[in-house]
Image (cartoon, helix red, strand yellow):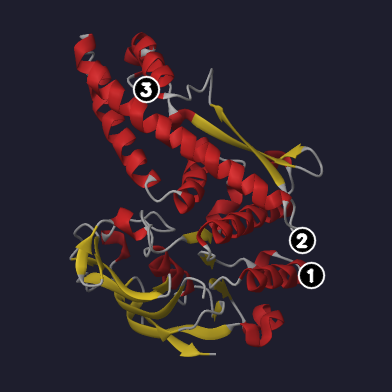
Amino acid sequence: MPTHLTHLKLSHFRSHKRVEMTTDARPVALYGANGAGKTNILEAVSLMSPGRGLRRASAEEMTRRPEALGWKITAMLEADTRAREIESLSEQGSARQVRIDGKPASQIALGKFARVLWLIPSMDRLWIEGADGRRRFLDRMTLSFFPDHAQAVLDYEKAMRERNRLLKDQVRDAHWYSALEVQMARAGAVIHANRQAALARIAEAQADTETAFPVSELDLTATEGEMPAGEAELRAALAESRFRDLATGRAMVGPHRAELHAVFAAKGVPARDCSTGEQKALLISLILANARALARDIGSPPILLLDEVAAHLDAARRAALYDEICALGAQAWMTGTGPELFADLGARAQRFEVSETGGASSIATG
């Protein structure tokens, strides 16, 4: 049985004052007018995994207005033949808290139970905007394979912030930097190795599967100069870069400077130069490849969140996407403005209509 949610309850989350849904392992089609609250449901599901969710919002931003009482999401997750209750909550704008089976837990712990991948409209410009977004996209893929990747990223960023503070204060004593650079090098080497291993899994999943979506070739390089891969190499590069870093006030080498490149394999064209439709298809292909690779690794596909994906595909490719999702066996939560967008799914999916009345969203079985 694939990993899936069987029950979802939202309290004072975004536009939802109180909503409950009971689901099975089939794909979930959510339809309704724009602004009805469909994406808010996907965001709630995304908080079953580590991080800030698909909108990268703060806990305070997710609370329902005007009450601002705080919010709570409760979900029953079926994974590894076990049912777990996962709670994600914030009290009056405080930092997000997580409980697993009633016990306090870290966000990182969620990655050991639920693997969640998403594709949202704001990602459509991934290949033509800044490198930061592509690094986050890569790290989400990497985290799906290596739940401890989140801790390595946290450790690296914490040490880098402290080192950057020294740089901005123009501290020149090498002893202040050495310990921080050791921490950055140790965590940075893990980050780089995890990313490369994730890209290898994605490449394998794309090569071994016939799909209606185009295959991309992925490559990880440095924004400028060389990419130190090993711990010793990165530590030496950080020490050598101190003088330049003092001038800029920040670290100029390390995994935070990595750049993810993609090429439309069949055409040999960089993703940034592809048409809008081709860029979207490449993204969908990568999400599906990520899901297939995870299914091989852990024996179960991840939960997929696909916001407004149907509206950007022609009828043939939309039907192909649904066929691939069902063949994979993933519980894919998908949104669209009308039920006709999901007609090709037939009985293979469960449907819910999302509406908004009087400033509150509601859900009914479609």
For label 1, the residue is 316
Whether residue 164 sits left or right of residue 4 in the image: it is left
For label 3, the residue is 251
Check disc 1: other Cα within 10 Å, few if <14, some if 14-19, many if 20+.
few
The front one of 171 and 291 is: 291
- Which mark's residue is nearer the viewer, 3 or 2? 2
The front one of 312 and 89 is: 89
Kind of residue indicated by mark 3: Ala
Kind of residue indicated by mark 2: Ala
Question: Which of the marked residues, 1 or 2, is nearer the chain's N terminus?
Answer: 2
User: Compared to 151, does 209 lie above or below?
Assistant: below
User: Compared to 316, does 245 lie above or below?
Assistant: above
Image coordinates of residue 124 in percent, x first then y, are 60, 52
Check disc 2: other Cα within 10 Å, few if <14, some if 14-19, many if 20+.
some
- Residue 346 seen by the camera: yes
Image coordinates of residue 305 in percent, x first then y, are 52, 66
Kind of residue indicated by mark 1: Ala
Q: Are marks 3 and 2 in contact (CB under 8 Å)?
A: no
Q: Are marks 1 and 3 in contact (CB under 8 Å)?
A: no
Residue that sits furthest to the bottom in the current view: 365
Label of residue 106 in the image: none
Where residue 89 sits, quadrant-wise, is bottom left
For label 2, the residue is 212
Question: Which of the marked residues, 1 or 3, is nearer the chain's N terminus?
Answer: 3
- Residue under the image location 26 percent in, 72 percent down: 72
